[in-house]
Amino acid sequence: EVQLVESGGGLVKPGGSLRLSCAASGFRFSDYSMNWVRQAPGKGLEWVSSTDVTTNYIYYADSVRGRFTISRDNAKNSLYLQMNSLRVEDTAVYYCVKEEGDTGGKGGWFDSWGQGSLVTVSS
Amino acid sequence: DIVVTQSPDSLTVSLGERATINCKSSQSLLFTSNNKNYLAWYQHKPGQPPKVLIYWASTRASGVPDRFSGSGSGTDFTLTINSLQAEDVGIYYCQQYYSTLLAFGQGTRLEIK
């Protein structure tokens, strides 16, 4: 059974930093692209970032590019999101998501999700 | 960037009836090399992570009841839920994966009348 467990969320002041981690199990982590998706309070789902299996291809939403960094450690079956220069509008539940699909170099759909980690940015 | 827009924003349907949710893309999601539409649908219930229902615009994910179906091609897509059940209440999202800059629609809230 696929399991994705996020950790590292919490309360941080505007301008601060936080690092989210995601521990993966139940599948061959090194074979799959991985993503972060967030949901702000009362808002819809927003894709944040994706990485391919080797981190050669990494993409970010415009809203976080230059402030957030996605990374992975295939030996540890772990995905990370380093969040710097945090803003109030970054307040959200952050989901670690496994990507699926042989899509010819394009994106993929999300077949497994963690339970989410709440990040609150407030003074 | 590819933008996907859903309609309506909310929907109220009686038990046993049909619910229809639309998703329109700013660019075609049909990849001519494989003749596939790069669109997925998700169901999101409070307190749970989202769940994929449909991918490739019309392929049901494993374990999804056959009352859920997806259709459409190019820029216009539809999620249809037949014989609506009480457990179908939630928010539904479409997602395009044609671009590596992935994107969700704004969501459609489905309620029972």
Image: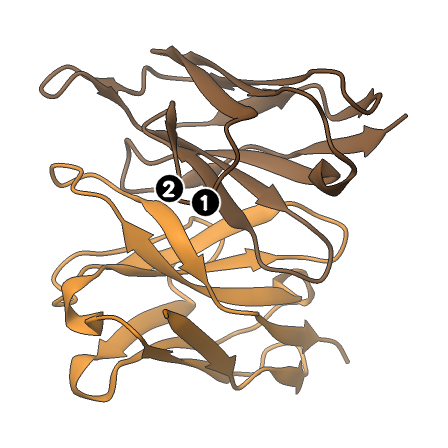
Quarter holding the C terminus of chain B? top right
Q: Earlier in the sequence, mark 1 or mark 2?
A: 1
The residue drawn where x is 27% and y is 74% is: A71
Viewer can see residue A113: yes
Discs 1, 2: same chain: yes
Viewer can see residue B25: no
Say how many tags the image has. Answer: 2
Which one of the lettered chains is coloured brown? B
Q: Which mark is residue B102?
A: 2
Quarter holding the N terminus of chain B? top left
Does residue A119 lie above or below A31 as drawn?
Answer: below
Can you tell which quarter of the image residue A12 is in? bottom right
Which one of the lettered chains is coloured orange? A
Mark 2 falls on what kind of element?
loop
**B31 or B60, which lies in front?**
B60
In the image, residue B105 lies at what x, y percent? Answer: 55, 32
Q: Which mark is residue B63?
A: 1
